[in-house]
Image (spheres, rainbow, N blue to C red):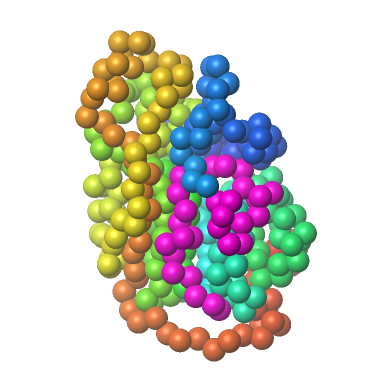
Amino acid sequence: MKKEQELKDIVKQRYTTIAEQGKVENASSCCGATTPSNKVYNIMMDDYSETSGYIEDADLGLGCGLPTKFAHIQKGDTVIDLGSGAGNDCFVARHETGSEGKVIGIDFTPIMIQKARSNAEKLGFNNVEFREGDIDAMPVNDAVADVIVSNCVLNLVPNKEKVISEIHRVLKPGGHFSISDIVLVGDLPDALKQDAEMYAGCVAGAIQKGDYLKLIEDRGFQNIKIQKEKTISIPDDILSKYLSQDDIQSFNKGATGIYSITVYAEKEGVRQEKPKLKLSEIQDSDCCEPTSGCC
């Protein structure tokens, strides 16, 4: 298995390329994995187009669910989006939390941060900010968020246990998360697990569904629920880059399943009612350094 930093560098380079290309050029991706014949396969992403708050320019087609749909975001909430990309889920969350709330997007790809900040500026959203950093070491204080969302990102992080611990740290008591991600039932062929592009394409970095849920339970989260689950089928056109025809047939007939799940869980404690903030307080609270360009 490659070292953690090497895997992070692979993902960062891949998603830098995706950001440079945009959604149209990336339409033939398997959450980032290309196909030899350039056919268009939207096998993971869900359709956001009818979602309130959706901004097409911020949608690069990289998700595997609709976590904000199940996030129970309330007016005035502080929401953090992990792996925020060009800002798609942040802007949907902003529609739910309103101008009196706050949304913080975290991404470790500089060009994604630039795109997201540009989108927020064009929209005039002064209560949405984007911070560059790793989601396994979030650049936010303890007990900041009422809600955390994420869309097809934890599978890209080598140390998923650390991310779950960070989610617990930054959530307020009684806060909760809604996360869409890719998980497995059964083992992937070695050729898929070892390929760098398949790791950056959300599949090779996925872990067993049971192990994923146990990480959440072991960290002390409560009321864990799978809100949505769908099967992900990798087209033969993609598999042919890694497997022989015989191996493809064996894989398709085997017991291994690849799934997109949207998981909900709550941090222990009682959620406190919060007073409505004035606009100046929203702008100043928990703000990062002015030189970062996010405030």
Name the residue at the bottom extreme.
Answer: 275
- Looking at the image, residue 11 sits to the left or right of residue 161; the answer is right
Give me the residue at 71% from left, 67% from top: 125
- Looking at the image, residue 264 sits to the left or right of residue 52; the answer is left
Where on the picture, by quarter, is residue 183?
top left
| Main secondary structure of the magenta stretch | loop
Give me the residue at 72% from left, 55% from top: 119
Q: Nearer the viewer, residue 178 or 156?
A: 178
Q: Nearer the viewer, residue 137 or 94?
A: 94
- Residue 170 shows in the view: no
- Looking at the image, residue 110 sits to the left or right of residue 205; the answer is right
Give me the residue at 61% from left, 33% from top: 26
Q: Nearer the viewer, residue 38 or 162?
A: 38
Q: In x, y percent, where is residue 161?
A: 35, 52
Q: In x, y percent, where is residue 78?
A: 54, 72
Q: In x, y percent, where is residue 76?
A: 55, 78
- Image vertical order of residue 69 relative to residue 8, above or below: below
Q: The C terminus lies in which quarter of the figure?
A: bottom right
- Looking at the image, residue 128 sits to the left or right of residue 136; the answer is right
Give me the residue at 38% from left, 77% from top: 173
Q: Residue 58 colored magenta?
A: yes
Q: In x, y percent, where is residue 35?
A: 53, 22
Q: The N terminus lies in which quarter of the figure?
A: top left
- Image vertical order of residue 16 relative to residue 48, above or below: above
Number of marks:
0
Q: Residue 204 colored magenta?
A: no
Name the residue at the left extreme.
Answer: 255
- Residue 234 shows in the view: yes
The residue stretch that appears in magenta: 48-76
